[in-house]
Image (cartoon, rainbow, N blue to C red):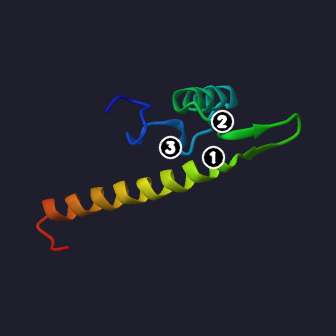
Amino acid sequence: MPHGQPGSGNSPVSSGKPFPATSLTRQIHNLEEELSVRLLDRSKNRVSLTEEGRSFLADAKRLLAQSLESIAAVQRFSRGESA
């Protein structure tokens, strides 16, 4: 997996390093464009999730948890451990 790709463990977010706001803003904008859905309500002093954003976040968290469980399961299997 290329450096900086989601799930690679090498992205600024997964490493706990500061993530430039402009880069994050650009990625969110690109995601909104790809989905053709506005995920955030933006005003001068505030940013909040739209209803669609809340739904997408819940699904994303669920999928991330499932992928982490799958990784742990295959690693246990590789070590010969039972489920």
Mark 3 crowdedness (10 Å alpha carbons): few <14, some 14-19, many ≥20: few
Label 3: state its secondary structure. helix
Which residue is more in the foreground, 70 or 13? 70
How far is the residue under mark 1 from the one under mark 2?
7 Å
Which amino acid, by three-letter code, is at mark 1?
A: Gly
Asked whether the residues under the numbered discs 1 and 3 touch, taking CB atoms below 8 Å apart as contact, a structural biologist would say no
Residue placed under numbered mark 1 in the picture: 53
Give the Cα distance between marks 2 and 3.
Answer: 27 Å
Give the SS element for disc 2. Answer: loop
Query: Is the residue under label 2 in contact with that under label 1 (CB below 8 Å)?
Result: yes
SS state under label 1: helix
Q: What is the C-alpha distance between the residues marked 1 and 3?
A: 24 Å
Q: Residue 21's quadrant in the figure?
A: top right
Earlier-in-chain disc, 1 versus 3: 3
In the displayed structure, 58 sits above or below 30; it is: below
Q: Position of residue 35 (x, y in %)?
A: 53, 33
User: What quarter of the picture does the N terminus occupy?
Assistant: top left
Please give the residue where the numbered disc 2 appears in the rendered image: 38
Q: Which residue is mark 3?
A: 15
Query: Residue 48 location in percent, x, y?
Result: 75, 46
Amino acid of disc 2 = Arg
Q: Residues within 10 Å of mark 1 (few under 14, many from 20)?
A: some
